[in-house]
Image (spheres, rainbow, N blue to C red):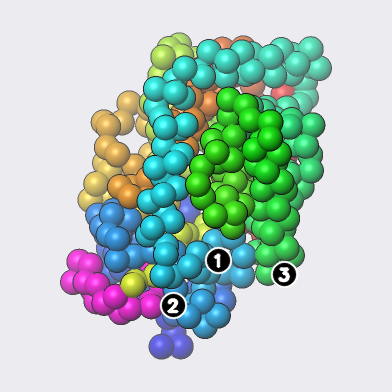
Amino acid sequence: MADLPRLPFERTSVLEISSAYGTLRAREPIARVRTRTGDEAWLVTGYEQARAIFADERFGRSHPDPDHAPRVSNSALTGGPNGEYATEKEVHDRMRRLLAPAFSARRMQALSGHVQELVDDLLDRMEEHGPPADLHASLSVPLPIQVICELLGVPLADRDHFRAIAEEMTDLTDPDRSAAARTAMEEYSHGIVKTKRDHPGEDVYSDLARADVPDDEIATMAGGLLFAGHETTVNRIDAGVVLLLDNPEQLEALKRDPALAPAAVEEIMRIGAPNDHGLGRYAREDVEVDGVTIRAGELCVIMISAANRDDTVFVEPERFDLGREVQPHLGFGYAIRYCLGASLARVELRAVFGSLFQRFPDLRLAVPLDGLPERSERLTGGFAALPVTW
């Protein structure tokens, strides 16, 4: 088995994924590989196969022997097993029941006017500052942070503190540093939740404080919400801007008709690939998926960016197309593993892409595409900066 393909596969561009995924998918949509840590795993690159695993409760994030489980990477966040094997489903179901009302599509849509005001304010500041600007620092980072702080009930004054912790959590090179940052995030968030017990507000952390949930679960949930609620949206804003600038015909269509913003968001979620990490899932028992038997305890690495380019599902999957016929992508997961924050992310992204190029129709990169500073050693990938001018 020494000659198994080794992750990560080489990328030639920040806008593309390795062609090796497509080659492998055509032959084996579920194939044996070695991960970054040298462990054996099943790489899932097929769309239907990925959906099947997402929807199957026999796959989870925990492992009965976590210290000896195969890993995707050295990341303490998503590189290996998470949660208690005996109680994973119970905890997962309780978390979704508790948080689903706060992140419902109706409640998120009610936020859309306020989110638009935040976007407009940030664009005003960009305009006042004048070109050039770092769009990453001026828009992509502050918008999701302000929204998630208000929604969760986190002091906005703490944003630099928890942003620094989040950066360390995503470290792929130093597992101890990543683990320590994850603990720090959970402790920080749990501290706020404890304060909310005495001084509740109309926010998600106050909901957690009122819930009959063990403290360790509260810490995990609260920290995870704060991290996921801003970090992934930051990268999607950056990726979407670069994708649109690299596809001028599609960008011109969006400028002519900003009502295409929702379509742009879905295409950005489908084809954007800020990172090349993959999602790890462990079989809780022997499971057959598409004729492949995955044994209990074995690791599956779901490569969403590859599944979203499955040419048996998407016509010309490598093409960025705002007029694409609707076909559900896996950018937010699927079924029981569908992202709770999907509606929130859509509200933020639609506000950004419905406004940015209306305000700055001549917006363009201030450096060559291949000169954008990438965060390749970070779990969430993306860019460290996005220099633009107009």
Q: Can residue 362 be seen in this view?
A: no
Q: Can residue 325 be seen in this view?
A: yes
To which quarter of the image does residue 77 belong? bottom right
Q: Distance between the residues labelled 2 and 3?
A: 22 Å
**Outermost residue toward the bottom in this view:** 1
Mark 2, Cα crowd under 10 Å, few <14 / some 14-19 / many 20+, is some
Mark 1, Cα crowd under 10 Å, few <14 / some 14-19 / many 20+, is many
Residue 79 shows which numbered tag?
1
Q: Which of 66 and 268 is in front in this view?
A: 66
Residue 126 shows which numbered tag?
none
Residue 79 among those drawn in magenta: no
Q: Name the amino acid type tagged 2.
A: Pro
Q: In which quarter of the image is the N terminus?
A: bottom left
Q: In this view, does 116 lie to the left or right of 313?
A: right
Magenta segment, which residues?
285-300
**Outermost residue toward the left in this view:** 291
The residue under label 3 is: 176
